[in-house]
């Protein structure tokens, strides 16, 4: 089933000709229904979206909740799950001559499952160690259930 959570990039270089660059739904595999607190808690939404840019990559995280169906028959049950959808964007791929559906600016990188409640904030950072690696810190309502994840090498 489709998701009702999407990321949009809008071209505002010419205020007389504002246009949608691309809109892409957050990818959540095997989900039956997807939503986000971003859809209804508008005065806090800007705090829930995580953004990171380090000169090499631009990353955005979006908290989502969804249901997965269990059971092999039509009489299965639904499991409530929470996660953070992750995308990157590259404005050098923007071609103003193309329609929003033909753009390749946004790229989905899947979701990070967060089993301990809905994520309220995500912080993306580069951990400097012998080799630099990008990490994401997910903070739910109860801080004691926070989680960190290494972001896969493709970013």
Image (cartoon, rainbow, N blue to C red):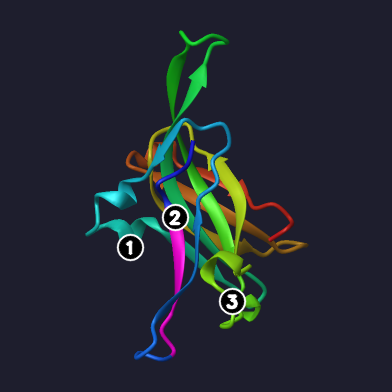
Against 142, residue 48 (above or below) is below
Q: State the residue at coordinates (67%, 65%).
A: 128
Q: Nearer the viewer, residue 88 or 151?
A: 88
- What range is drawn magenta here? 6-13
Task: Tell me the tag on residue 46.
Answer: 1
As for residue 8 lying within the magenta part, the answer is yes
Write down the residue under mark 3.
98
The secondary structure type at the circle numbered 3 is loop
The secondary structure type at the circle numbered 2 is strand
Q: Nearer the viewer, residue 116 or 82?
A: 82
Tell me where residue 106 sits by quadrant. Answer: bottom right
The secondary structure type at the circle numbered 1 is helix
Cα gap from disc 3 to disc 1, whole angstroms: 29 Å
The rendered magenta stretch, by its main secondary structure, is classed as strand
Counting residues from the start of the chain, the first of labels 1 and 2 encountered is 2
31 displayed left or right of 121: right
Q: State the residue at coordinates (33%, 60%).
A: 47
Write down the residue under mark 2.
6
Q: Residues within 10 Å of mark 1 (few under 14, many from 20)?
A: few
Cα gap from disc 3 to disc 2, whole angstroms: 20 Å
Counting residues from the start of the chain, the first of labels 3 and 1 encountered is 1
Counting residues from the start of the chain, the first of labels 3 and 2 encountered is 2
């Amino acid at each position: 089933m489709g998701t009702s959570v999407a990321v949009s990039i809008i071209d505002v270089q010419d205020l007389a000709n504002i246009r949608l660059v691309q809109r892409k739904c957050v990818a959540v595999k095997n989900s039956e229904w997807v939503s986000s607190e971003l859809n209804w808690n508008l005065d806090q939404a800007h705090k829930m979206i995580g953004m990171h840019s380090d000169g090499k990559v631009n990353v955005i995280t979006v908290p989502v909740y969804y249901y997965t169906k269990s059971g092999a028959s039509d009489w299965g049950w639904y499991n409530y799950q929470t996660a953070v959808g992750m995308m990157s964007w590259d404005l050098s791929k923007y071609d103003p001559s193309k329609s929003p559906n033909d753009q390749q600016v946004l790229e989905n990188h899947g979701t990070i499952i967060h089993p301990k409640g809905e994520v309220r904030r995500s912080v993306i950072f580069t951990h400097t160690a012998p080799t630099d690696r990008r990490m994401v810190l997910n903070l739910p309502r109860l801080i004691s259930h926070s989680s960190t994840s290494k972001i896969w090498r493709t970013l």
